Amino acid sequence: NMRAATHQERIAFFSQFGYEISEDPLEVKEVVIPTEFDETYEEYNSIQKSQGLDLSKYKGKRVKMWSYAIRNYPGYETADGTIRGNILVYDGVVVGGDVSNIELGGFMVGFANENSQ
C-alpha cells in the first residue's frame, strides 16, 4: 500500500515495514524533482529502483517530502530522532523515500531493508 495522503495513511505506510513513527512529522517541505539527475540523485534513485520505485518518472514535478522519526529501528530504539523515515508524496501516493541515520557517517536504505525485518 503506497497511499500517503493523510496522517493515518502515512502511519499505515510505515507500519507495513514494521516501523513506528513519531506522531508529528519532523519536517514537511516541497521538493522539485530535478529534470536532470546528478550523481547524488542517480544514487538516490538506485535505492528507489531497488524498492520498485523510480523517480525519473517524476522529473520536473513538485512532490511533498514528509520526514518522521522512526521510534523502533533495531538498535536505535532510544536514540530519539536519529533514524528518519522520509517519503516523497505525489498526488497522495508515495513515489520515493528512504530510511536514514542522520548521524555523521550514517546510512540510507530503502524501506524494506534487512534490518527492518
Image (cartoon, grey):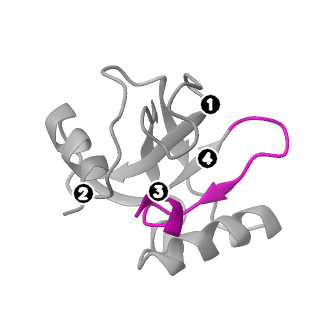
Circle count:
4
Over which residues does the magenta segment extend?
Answer: 102-117
**Residue at position x 24%, y 57% in the image:** 16
Image location of residue 31, percent across then percent down: 54, 43
Q: Nearer the viewer, mark 3 or mark 4?
A: 4
Q: Secondary structure at mark 1?
A: loop
Marks 4 and 1, the one that precedes in the sequence: 1
Q: Amino acid at mark 1?
A: Thr
Report the front residue among 79 and 38: 79
* 4 left or right of 64 in image: left
**Residue at position x 70%, y 36% in the image:** 102
For residue 105: magenta?
yes
9 w.r.t. 2: above or below: above
**Label 2 CA crowd tier, 10 Å (few <14, some 14–19, many 20+):** few
Q: Within the image, what quadrant is residue 44 found in? A: bottom right
Q: Residue 92: in sight, yes or no?
A: no
The residue that disc 4 covers is 100
For residue 66: magenta?
no
Give the quarter of the figure containing the N terminus. bottom left
Q: Within the image, what quadrant is residue 45 found in? A: bottom right
Q: Amino acid at mark 3?
A: Lys
Marks 2 and 3, the one that precedes in the sequence: 2
Marks 3 and 4, the one that precedes in the sequence: 3
Q: Cα distance, mark 4 to mark 2? A: 17 Å
The residue that disc 1 covers is 82
7 w.r.t. 74: above or below: above
Discs 4, 2 touching: Cβ within 8 Å = no
The residue that disc 2 covers is 16
Q: Amino acid at mark 2?
A: Gln
The residue that disc 3 covers is 61
Q: Secondary structure at mark 3?
A: loop
